[in-house]
Amino acid sequence: MEDWTGKILELKETVLEDNDADADRLRGELAETGTYYLNIMSSPGSGKTTCILRLIRRLSSEFAVGVLEADIDGDVDARTVAAAGVPAVQLHTGGMCHLDADMSRQSLREIGSDSLDLVILENVGNLVCPAEFDTGAAANLVILSVPEGDDKPLKYPLMFEKADAVLVNKIDALEAFDFDMERFIANVRLRNTAAPVFPVSGRTGEGFDAAADWLRGRIIAWKEGQHRG
């Protein structure tokens, strides 16, 4: 990874009168090219990059995939993804804790999204402000790790309200923590009645077949235009 010489994009927040409207325009642009844009949100240390690579291994034979790695600084995650043979662009947000729609547009242009079936955004790690800004993604995937606790949907309701699916990572560590999966799912359901919850282990790969099946179905429906009707 030390020899990685990939792209680093320094993002600047654009002052927009209506980010939600711009996000809808971006979704329309991506629908025209058939590119599925997935926004992944979580707190630091949840295992986002590992989970992303687990999903890509199950989908890369069917779809052309690229990854956008958003951080305040550094390029560790982009190096990790690139070392796995996946096109990656490191995004520096200049201290901002989120991406908005125009920042997404800049990033998608840089990675060449027109030639990709799936672009995964690893958003800045926190459970607060990324949920407040629509990135223009087709779906939001939230990752929570077992050590964080099963009460997080109660403490960070917007994040789980915005989720189209939830991964519970590090289930191989369940015995070491006071984490009740049924209680967690019940807490999610207080905020979101529709999002599927996938228990997974980034370390062992357990559970990722079901999560990849969910994402595969979403990509195919997007490319066939079924999301419009």
Image (tube, grey):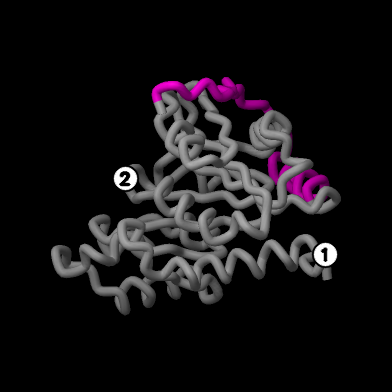
Start-end of magenta stretch: 2-30
Residue 226 lies in the magenta-colored region: no
Q: Position of residue 131 (x, y in %)?
A: 52, 49
| Left or right of 195 in this view: 190 | left
Would residue 184 be found to the left or right of residue 139 on screen?
left
CA gap, disc 1 to disc 2?
A: 35 Å
**Residue denoted by label 1:** 225
- Residue, x 48% and y 24% (percent of image)? 4
Q: Position of residue 45 (x, y in %)?
A: 31, 45
Left or right of residue 105: residue 1? left
- Image height of 162 relative to 90, above or below: below
Q: Amino acid at mark 1?
A: Gly
Q: Amino acid at mark 2?
A: Gly
Label 1 or label 2, whichever comes before in sequence order? 2
Residue 149, how many percent across, how many down?
25, 61
Task: Report crowding for label 2: few under 14, some 14 to 19, many 20 or more residues within 10 A (C-alpha).
Answer: few
Residue on which the image places disc 2: 45
Q: Quadrant of residue 176?
A: bottom left
